[in-house]
Amino acid sequence: MKQVLWLSSWYPNRCSVRNGNFVERQARIAASFVGLWVVQVQYAGWSFPGGWELVCRREKGFGELIVYFRCPDKPIWKLLFRALAYLKGIWRVYRIQGRPDLIHAHVLLDAGCVAWLYSRLLGVPFLLTEHATLFQRDRLPLLVRLCSRWVIRSAAAVVPVSHQLRDRLERLSAGRFVVLGNPVNTELFYPVERSGSKKRLRLLHLSTLRQETKNVAGLLRVIASLREKAGVLQFTLGGDGALEPWMRQAAEWNLPDGFLRFSGALDEAGVADCMREHDVFVLFSFAENLPCVLLEAQACGLPVIATRVGGVPELVPNERLGFLVNSGDEAGLRLAILRMVETYARFDRREIRAWAEARYGAPIFRDQLMGLYEQC
């Protein structure tokens, strides 16, 4: 069995339990056909006792090593200590796993750079899977551009999660690109049959709630503008970010009772249950690559309303799956929601589910990743 080392800039840990959970989902699939260890490093704050802690476990069919560290809260110190943390983690796994046959990095900055250096030291190939919205920017710092070119040119393959992201990376450097989207757990995310009459169309938004990417403020303004539709619409806003500021903002609008609800952080099963309780998923982001939350909503049979950014149009290629609006277009979002109210009966949950399963189901991802590993 091929031995593979994953280096991931993002991965669930005790400081952020949902950080990079899509990478963990991919690791579970990869571990079904390779021997796998995952290394991730995590800044734990200046107050973290001891300075260093290596947490090693094998509970999911593969090995995980999280290196927690403390240092002064300054970028240069964090960079230096992250490099040391990677060295500690890689050395510990090397003593357990030995020399890997392949290194697979997730996110170019910084795991991809570490993978490039380690692969040159060991003389083994490395792959890079890219998820970061950083590369959606038109202007990147010089150092980022230089590091990206080195890594992309040296990688056995670069695996962007969307075709749109591949196009952005190709502008930085020539390389071998293989698009492989994030998988969705279709055994957990599935639709349910609806029974009885519906008095309200229930719309859902779940995210990190970060304004700079998810545009929660714009979404809430649109929701407030639809207060006269309280008899036919109901919104739920939730996620694993700071919910209180949005709750305070909504309270100032004196919205009708039951019109806007809030939900805190949910685990994966909780997200699936929440989606099955709703009818439509809304994502009004400024920037995305291939958002897993849209795939999960589609696997539950929900039509979506989302912004035309990043790889999102690849998930909503036609209006049988939902509607797209321009980023920041609040008037367009309002019209899309009203249009959804008028046309919702024509959406087929089973058709939406089948579309997502055929393209992003775990078996599809497994076969494609296995083929990629065999070529390295």
Image (cartoon, rainbow, N blue to C red):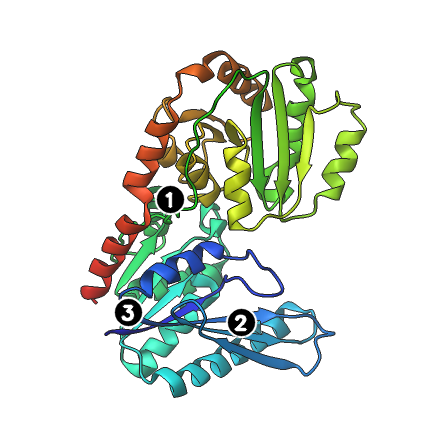
x 50%, y 42%: residue: 272
Q: Residue furthest left?
A: 375
Q: Which label lies toward us, 2 or 3?
A: 3
Q: Which mark is residue 34?
A: 3
Q: Quadrant of the N terminus?
A: bottom left
Q: Which residue is mark 1?
A: 186
Eyeballing the image, is 173 above or below 243? below
Which one is in front, 303 or 348? 348
Label 1: element kind: loop
Mark nearer the N terminus (2 vs 3):
3
C-alpha separation, residue under disc 1 versus residue under disc 2: 30 Å
Q: Amino acid at mark 1?
A: Thr
The foreground one among 282 and 352 is 352
Q: Secondary structure at mark 2?
A: strand
- The x and y percentages for residue 220 are 67, 29
Q: Amino acid at mark 2?
A: Val
Mark 3: amino acid = Val
**Label 3 SS:** loop
Give percent across and percent down for residue 182.
38, 49
**What residue is drawn where x is 68% and y is 36%?**
262
Residue 127: mark: none
Q: Is residue 149 left or right of residue 342?
A: left
Residue at 40 percent of width and 61 percent of height: 148
